[in-house]
Image (cartoon, rainbow, N blue to C red):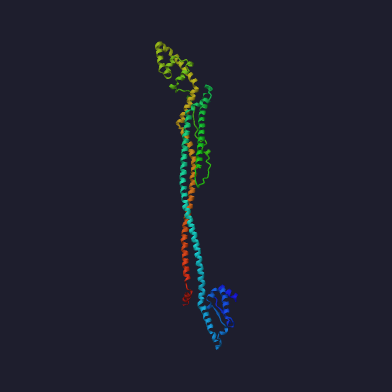
Amino acid sequence: ANQFLWNASNEKAYLFIVVNKFDEIKNKEKCRRMILEQIKQISPRTFEYHDDLVHFVSANAINVDGNPPHTNRIPEVDHLEESLRTFVLKKRSKSKLAPARHYLHNLLYDIGVLAEFNRELAAIEYDQLTRELEEGEPAFRKLQRDGSRVVEEAERLCESTCQSIRKTIKDQLSSVIDDIHKVDENCEYHGLLYMWNYAMELRDGMLQKIQNELSKCELIAKQEVSTCIEKIQEMPVQNLVIDPIDAKLDKYFTNRNNNPIQIHIDPSDFFDLNLGLDLNHRMNEHVGMLGISSGALVMFGGKFLGYNVMSNLFKISNVVGFNNMRKLALPLIGLAGFGFLVYIVSDARHAISRNVARKVRSQLTQSNYAECQAHRISYHGRKATRRLINHLRDCFRRAIDAEEQKRKEQREKAKVSDEAKFYFSGVFSKAEEMSKVLEVLDIDVVEDEILA
C-alpha cells in the first residue's frame, strides 16, 4: 500500500484514501496517527486536507439490506460519501488548478530570477562600456591631435630640408660654373696641330667637372634626406606603432639628367678677338717677341696701349714727317699683321681656354642650369620624404578610423545594454506583480465560479 500510494502521489497532487475494517482495530487513535504520518510523508497535500481526503470506515457500516443493526455507523459513511462527492465533483477542479498555480509560481519565480540576473549583467556591461568610453576619450583626442601635429612637423621638416638642399646645390653648382676656367690646368696643350683635340678635351673636362659636382650634390642631398627621414621616424608618438618603410633613396638620387649638356666647338673658339682693356698687360708680355714698330702701334695703340702711347706716336710722326711716314706705312702694317698673327698663335691655348670656358659658362647660365638641377634634386628629395609622410598620415588615419569604429561599437553596445537593463527591469516588475496576484488567488472561489 505504501508503494502504491507513493507512485500515485507522483502522478496526483491529492489522493482520496479509505481505510477499511477500521472497526476491527483496537487502538484506533494509534492506528490513525501512524497512517496519517505515512500519508504526510507520501503526499503532503493530501495530509493537508486529511479530514476530507482520508477516511477510516468499515464496510460493515454500510446498510446494504436496509436492516437496522448498523445504523450507529451511518454518520461516518455519510461523511465518506459527502467527501467523495466533494472530491470527485468539487475538489477535482482544485486538484487541477493547484498544480497550475504551482507551475505558474515556479515559472514566474524563474522569470524573475533570470530577469534580475540579466538586468544586473546589462547594468554591469553598460557601466563598463560607459567607463571605457569616458576613459578612452582623452586618448582618442590626443591621437587626433598627435596625428595633425606629427604630420605638420614632418611636413615642415621636409620643406626646410628641401629648401636647404636647393640652396646648397644652387650655390655649389654656381660656384663651379663661375670657376670653370680652372679646368685648363689639368689639360695638356700639344701645339697648333692639336688645338681641336685640346678644345674637345677642355670642353669634356669642364662638363665632367660639372657632372662630378652634380653627383656630389646628389650625394649630399641623399644624406640630408636620409637624416630627415630618420628624424621623422624618430618622432615620439604614443599608442601608435608605425611600420618602418624602406625609403629607397637610390632610385630618387641617381643622376637623372636625361638632357646632357651639349657644347659645340667652333673654329672661332680658337681665337680670342674680344680682348678688351684688360689685355694690355698681356700685350706687354709679347712686345719683345713681336718687335712691333711704331706704325703698327698706331693701328692698335688705342686698343692696346691707351691714350699716352698714341700721343707719343703722333709726336714721332711730326718729327719724322708725313711723307716719310707714308713710305713706312706699308712695311709697318705688314710687320704689325705679322706681329698680330704671332700673338694669336702664341695666345691660342689661353684663347681656347677662355672661349670654351666662356661658352660653357654662358650656356649654363642662360639655361639656368644650377637652378634647374637644384630644383630637380630638391623635388626628388621632397618626393622621397613625401612617401614617408604619406605613410605616416595613413598610419594615423587607420589608427583613428579603427578607434572611431571601436568607440562606435562601444556606444552601440552601451545603448543595447541600457535598453536591456530597462527591459529586464520591467520583466522583473511584471513577474513580481503577477506572483503577488497568484499568491492571493483563492482556488476555492475560482472552483465555485467554475461549478456555477
Residue closer to the observer: 35 or 416:
35
Find residue 409 and report its horizontal and vertical position in percent. 48, 54
Would you identify the image quadrant in which residue 63 lies?
bottom right
Q: Residue at x 47, y 69 (%)?
A: 436
Q: In this picture, is 425 found above or below 288?
A: below
Q: In this picture, is 16 found above or below 421?
A: below
Q: In this picture, is 380 found above or below 324?
A: below
Find residue 402 and report its horizontal and vertical position in percent. 49, 50
How many numbered marks are there?
Answer: 0
Residue closer to the observer: 14 or 187:
14
Quarter placement of the N terminus: bottom right
Find residue 430 and report its horizontal and vertical position in percent. 46, 66
Residue closer to the observer: 102 or 344:
102
Q: Residue at x 51, y 38 (%)?
A: 227
Find residue 345 and report its horizontal and vertical position in percent. 49, 20
